[in-house]
Amino acid sequence: MKKWIVSIVLIALITIPVSCLAASVTPQVFTFAGHNDVMTLDVSQMNDEMSALIMYALNESLIRNSYNEIIPGLAESYDVSEDGTVYTFHLRDAKWSDGVPVTAKDFEYSFLRTMNPNTGSSQVSEFDSILNAQAYYNGEITDTSLVGVKALDDKTLVLTLTYNDPFFITEMAEGINFYPIREEYVEKYGMSYASSPETFIGCGPFVLKEWVQGARITLEKNPEYWNADKVKLDKVVELIIPDENTRVGMYDLGEIDAIYSISKVQTIMHPEFGSRSGGTLQYLAFNCSEGLVMENMNLRKSLSYAIDREAIVAAISSPGTISVDRMIDPSIIIDGKSVTESYPNSTGVPPSGDIEKAKEFLNKALSELGLSKASDLPSINYVCMDSPVHKQYAEALQAGWKDGLGVDVGISILPVPQAIGALLSGQFDIFLVGQSSGVDPATIMNNFTIGNGNNYARWNSEEYSDLIAAQSENPDLAERLLQIQQAEAIILDEAPVAPLWTPGTAYLCREYVKNLHYGRQTGSIEFIFAYIEN
Amino acid sequence: MVGYIFRRLLISLLTLWLLATITFFLLRLLPGNPFQTDQILTFEMQERMMNYYGLNRPIIEQYFTYMGNLLQGNMGYSLKYTNRTVNSIISKAFPVSADLGLRSLALALPIGLFLGIASARKRGKTVDYLCVIISVIGVSIPSFILGSFLQYIFALKLKILPMAQWTTEMHKVLPTVAIALGLLATLTRIMRASMLEVTTQDYVKTAKSKGLSEGKIVWSHEIRNALIPILTMMGPMVASVLMGTFVIEKIFAIPGLGLHFVNSITGLDYTMTMGLTVFFGAFLVTANFLVDIAYGIVDPRIRIAK
């Protein structure tokens, strides 16, 4: 009997410290909630945030954008030719998650596959600065050896550009379609490639373990990853929870560690939220087509001056939203400095509007149109996308114009595809456009040239178009930025568009999750180097 | 009987063909195209995508291509979930919705019928009022309120049941109850009304005057006849419940068909909407067919074998 007691005590003495030790090590598991399933893991087809966010963890491109810095990915280094048109990438020794080495051929195959007209990718324009890429994806040439993508050997990839594009490396680091693809997987699974864990393979920090479509995605650390030492999480789970109240409820219960986008209402209940801005710019496009009411520049300026952006942002926008007065996103950094700081420009409209100036412009417009009062103006049609925030914006803007100027603006709310259809076919007077602001400061401004299919405002300025054309192939970056600044001054002065704000995103994350980052590449959370604190 | 089934089968196929055809053309009448999303693609890129998916070809040609594929059971690839076929999406999501639907039916059917019968038998008494109150509440509370309310009480406050997802048996309790309550209420109301109507029928009076026992009258004369209206509504009810409910599936994050129904239409995912419509149509037609056969079993007057 005594022996029993002694042995029990002994066992207890040995096991208790061991179990205490085991309990003190926090499992490195990170769980977050997304609102929609991954659309596809096919690198060539991918064009949505959900997919980009998961692909960022499952795969590895030549270079990465991490914590807003360009860091090496599978390319150990790269050289640029003197004229800036030939980029030679030197690959490191890296393996796919099944242990097969990654070669330059995998990149060559992936890039050419995306550009191939038979792939049906909507992302081909990502490769526009590569030699003959446009000719190939438009079907003008079929010989891929003419395209500026070449694997010299297993470790060397050469990309040839049409001109010296100073933004190429940054665009590549922030792009979501520059990952390698294993050809044999595409050959084997055809159209169903990358639609399940069996049909997909990556070479990134994590491996796709489970994909319950519409419900859950489980990733596990990839031991074959070249930089595996830096990856601390063992497992990442994304739960797909379409309803926001449910997501927040699960966060409150401690079932999930982070939600990467929450609405303004939820931020009131969760003051610990974080926020970020940039990457997208929202502006009003006025339809300047001949014969339409918005053809009148003074009327456009009048409406622009009457907008109290500050009040609207405070009342409606998600936290982090910053009101802007120009067509360049202030979050674009060149040489460590915001472009908007280095190259100032403004519409001159103060953040809270200037109703006196707006009235002056309105009076000018009315006399030009031969009208005596604002109510004589022809009907103005604001086409609004059917989303809660867009509807609130439309109503706030409408009320501002009515109260401040007495101008009546009618709102037509249309489902997203129809609304975009109206925008592209010019069946609107005013439209709130949100556009990704890209890496090149002129990304959005490039649209408004004469004859451009995406010149939503249908505004024609030769001087502006010439400047945009001149800057686009100017190898001298400083000169290029000056030309962009000059072009911007013209568009801001003639006001075919009224810049509004860069929308923010509010997110929730538990304090014990460290090193989580809101990245520019995915427009969403980057968790590859995150860890759970004890 | 064989002739009847054959005739019904032909009519069903005709119905499905009409359904598919009308949906096909109605969908194309909607303005816009699937590639106009809030991440605005350039005009050229949209044309490219329309060409790639053959959506720029003459509509009649597209119609025949689609119908040809449909006849072989191939519903094509989703335009949004690229790389996934509509068949594979349905085959993954339908079992989930059907599981949830069957659970709710299994819960709602016996309770609903029992409450309906009890209520009719005790007409004007406390039991009746209770049942009427339950059914009015069940019918009038929208499922999104009920779902959120259940989540709030049992998951957030009491912490005895999980909030959402469709994994363990415990996860399935709340959504099942949320759907079942609405069904139960409808069933109770119809069963009650139907029972009350049957009680005044001549054959019940005859049975009473013959001196049959109360239990025998209720069981083999009243309930059996009162079930016919229930059977009539069972076809569409079963079909719609098994097809998933948008709201409950959204609130409880259940990967069923419900979300696909709504999202595919708002996103103009033509192939997905078509696939779901045809699938739902086929299911509904089958359910109604089974109900027609069941009539004969319950009610000898509607024997179909003539």
Image: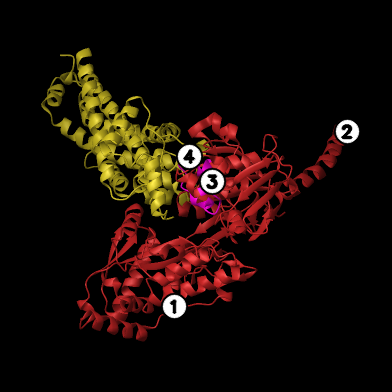
Chain colours: A red, B yellow
* Sequence order check, earlier mark of 3 and 4: 4
Q: Given this view, does label 4 or label 1 mark the residue nearer the observer?
A: 4
Measured Cα–Cα span from mark 3 to mark 1: 44 Å
Q: Residues within 10 Å of mark 4 (few under 14, many from 20)?
A: some
Tell which subunit mark 1 falls on: A
Q: Which one is in front, A428 or A451?
A: A451
Q: Give the residue at mark 2.
A: A2
In the rendered image, residue A455, in percent from the top left (x then y), is placed at: 38, 62
Magenta region:
A113-133
Q: Is residue A132 found inside the magenta-colored segment of the image?
A: yes
- Residue A18 is covered by the magenta coloring: no
Please tell me which of labels 3 and 1 falls first in the chain: 3
User: In what element is the residue under mark 3?
Assistant: strand
Of labels 4 and 1, earlier in sequence is 4
Amino acid, disc 4: Thr
Co-location on one chain, circles 2 and 3: yes
- Chain under disc 3: A
Q: Is residue B21 left or right of residue A498?
A: left
The residue at which mark 1 appears reads as: A347
Q: Quick one: SS at disc 2? A: helix
Residue at the disc numbered 3: A239
